[in-house]
Amino acid sequence: MRFRNVPRTARVAACSALIALVLTGCETLREILEVEAPTAEVDSVRIESLSFTDVGLIAEIGVENPNPIGISLAGFSYTVDLEGERILEGDQPQGLAIESFDRSVVLLPVGLNYESILESVRSLRGQTEARYEIGVELRFDLPILGPITIPVNTEGSIPIVRPPSVRIAGLTLDSIGIRGASLSLTVAVENPNSFGVGLDALEYSFAVQDREWAGGGLSRSTSVRPESTQELTFDFALSFSEFGRTVRDLLLGESSIDYAFTALAEIDPDFDLLPDVSFPYSRSGSIPLRRR
């Protein structure tokens, strides 16, 4: 660079600017040369949502940037194992900017469907909880260091919940006469869970040969203890003047009855994370006719 014919004050200003530029460049270069790999850890895994069909988890991964310059998370891949079996894996290409000397949190949502995981991991059938392991590989592209991957993992357990079932457990002919018959229908409510459930309401319909023989609901709410079955008995009467002689012959001659059963149950789980829910049920088949 030549300063001929340039005023002295201008030459001094130019030199000062050049020195400042060099010093600034050296400082930036020093910062780049001293770049360190970030650190990461799983801060927590919480249950975000829970129902009788699905469980949703949120894993919070803390990433620490120890450098005086900002860095970028290029993306991450993840795996989810239950009882040692791989049930889920994926990749998140979306990045995240992390400022100098800052800490950011990466959120990983994990959704699991109970029907799917019970089909995939047969050892979970009959279990009330499952051990999980979540593995995450965070991808960074850093100055000097280039592309690096930082793995983190965490373990824990999730509850295994199953919807209560409602089925016909018995049909009994209590008495029969010229005008009609008295019967009782036994409905079984099974709770396969490790917590109790309240049965706030149950509306049902019991039909034979496309005609409703009985229908109604609970007169009061009841509860079903953990991992137990409770039977409910509903008494009803059939008038032969209304249903005809065919029904009388059926009750006297048949050993089993073909039926169709529908019900709507309002369930109140004794488990804080589970909301109240209404379950529809539909069953059909053949049931033995017991006689007293």
Image (cartoon, rainbow, N blue to C red):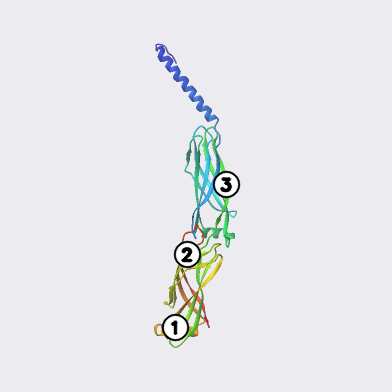
Residue at the disc numbered 3: 153
Name the residue furthest front.
Answer: 220
Give residue 6's quadrant in the image: top left
Given residues 104 and 28, the one toward you in this image is 104
Contact flag, marks 3 and 1 (Cβ < 8 Å): no
Give the x, y percent position of residue 201.
Answer: 45, 68
The CA distance from mark 3 to mark 1 is: 66 Å
Which of disc 2 and disc 1 is earlier in sequence?
1
The CA distance from mark 1 to mark 2 is: 35 Å
Q: Is residue 229 above or below residue 46?
A: below
Q: Secondary structure at mark 2?
A: strand
- Labelled disc at residue 203: none
Tell me the quadrant of the picture where the N terminus can be found.
top left
**Structural crowding at the residue carrying mark 2, measured as other residues with C-alpha within 10 Å and reported as few (<14), some (14–19) or many (≥20):** many
- Labelled disc at residue 267: 2
Contact flag, marks 3 and 2 (Cβ < 8 Å): no
What amino acid is labelled 2 in the image? Ile
Q: Nearer the viewer, mark 1 or mark 2?
A: 2
Which of disc 2 and disc 3 is earlier in sequence?
3
Given residues 73 and 222, the one toward you in this image is 222
Residue at the disc numbered 1: 247
Q: Is residue 220 above or below residue 19?
A: below
Give the x, y percent position of residue 64.
Answer: 53, 38
